[in-house]
Image (cartoon, rainbow, N blue to C red):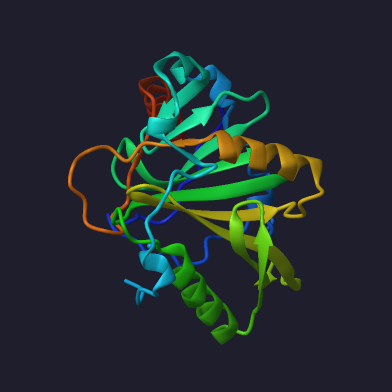
């Protein structure tokens, strides 16, 4: 298990069109997966847009990430429990919670395999309303307004956006990074996926990461939630204890 890096405090509801930090944007972010990654889920025990007509169509079960209703009890041992997500235990897969909500819960989760990474954020959604179609319009509008380029295309998770984001590294050098925005509408939840690093579908690390994302399980829970409210990521007790120990050592 490695060191946890922390970002700004998150709120209980979120703007799903916001651009997360890319690990290629600064030198510090290139260290993701070294000092910042929570290594190997295998060692742990488990978005208001105007609604279009298409977005009102009934939702079926997704092809991945999956809904909790899509897996049987005997498969639970194959996952590590992170609250909003059950993460498949895959060798080499690094897990890092992001945007702390409190001492134990977080707003999002980053998974990394080699050079490829993805930030996952889950929110509650109406059972009969799709969010991704209208949210794509928002992301595209915000992206181009900032002077970046955005291409809509069909990808592994349906319609997605490929964004060319202008960045400046800590040494002052300017450049661009690519980010893929994807969205998955579940029965009563929505997950935003933002891929960065090696984003090409032909990259072997990205292929393994997409495999892990498709096996991921979303746990919405049964309690009433306002649409777009974050479904929190919760650390397993073992990792909570390790984080507390790391923080104590840093303060010593």
Indicate whether 34 appears above or below 48. above
Q: Assign the C terminus to one quadrant of the image.
A: top left
Decide which of 78, 101 is in the foreground and name it: 78
Residue 8 at x, y percent in the picture: 40, 56
Quarter of the image for residue 36 reads top right
* Residue sitting farthest toward the left: 224
In percent of the image, x 17 and y 47: which residue is there?
A: 224
Q: Position of residue 159 (x, y in %)?
A: 60, 63
Q: Report x, y in % for residue 185.
A: 44, 53
Q: Quadrant of residue 126?
A: bottom left
Q: Quadrant of the N terminus?
A: top right
Q: Nearer the viewer, residue 163 or 23?
A: 163
**Left or right placement of residue 209 versus residue 243 in this view:** right
Q: Residue at 35% across / 22% down in the picture?
A: 237
Residue in front for this viewpoint, 26 or 67: 67
Residue 200 in view: yes
Numbered marks: total: 0
Q: Report whether residue 33 is seen.
A: no
Q: Going 50% across and 38% down the picture, which residue do you hit?
A: 4
Work out whether 137 lies above or below 126: below
Residue for point 65% across, 42% down:
210
Q: Is residue 164 left or right of residue 109?
A: right
Q: Position of residue 106 (x, y in %)?
A: 37, 44
In this rendering, position of residue 118 left or right of residue 186: right
In the rendered image of this protein, does residue 122 appear above or below residue 111?
below
């Amino acid at each position: 298990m490695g060191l946890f890096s922390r970002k700004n405090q998150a709120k209980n509801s979120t703007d799903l069109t916001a651009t997360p930090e890319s690990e290629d944007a600064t030198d510090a972010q290139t260290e993701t997966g070294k000092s910042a990654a929570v290594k190997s889920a295998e060692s742990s025990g488990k978005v208001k847009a105007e609604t279009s007509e298409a977005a009102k169509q009934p939702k079926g079960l997704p092809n991945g990430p999956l809904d909790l209703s899509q897996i049987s009890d005997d498969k639970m041992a194959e996952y590590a429990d992170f609250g909003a997500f059950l993460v498949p235990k895959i060798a080499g897969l690094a897990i890092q919670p992001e945007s702390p909500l409190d001492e134990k819960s977080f707003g999002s989760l980053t998974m990394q395999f080699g050079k490829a990474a993805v930030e996952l954020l889950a929110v509650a959604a109406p059972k009969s309303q799709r969010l991704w179609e209208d949210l794509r319009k928002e992301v595209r509008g915000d992206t181009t307004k900032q002077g970046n380029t955005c291409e809509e295309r069909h990808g592994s998770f349906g319609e997605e956006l490929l964004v060319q984001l202008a960045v400046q590294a800590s040494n002052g050098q300017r450049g661009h990074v690519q980010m893929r925005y994807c969205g998955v509408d579940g029965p009563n939840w929505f997950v935003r996926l933002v891929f960065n690093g090696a984003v090409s579908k032909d990259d072997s690390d990205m292929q393994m990461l997409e495999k892990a994302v498709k096996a991921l399980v979303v746990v919405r829970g049964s309690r009433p939630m306002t649409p777009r409210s974050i479904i929190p990521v919760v650390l397993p007790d073992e990792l909570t204890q390790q984080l507390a120990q790391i923080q104590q050592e840093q303060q010593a």
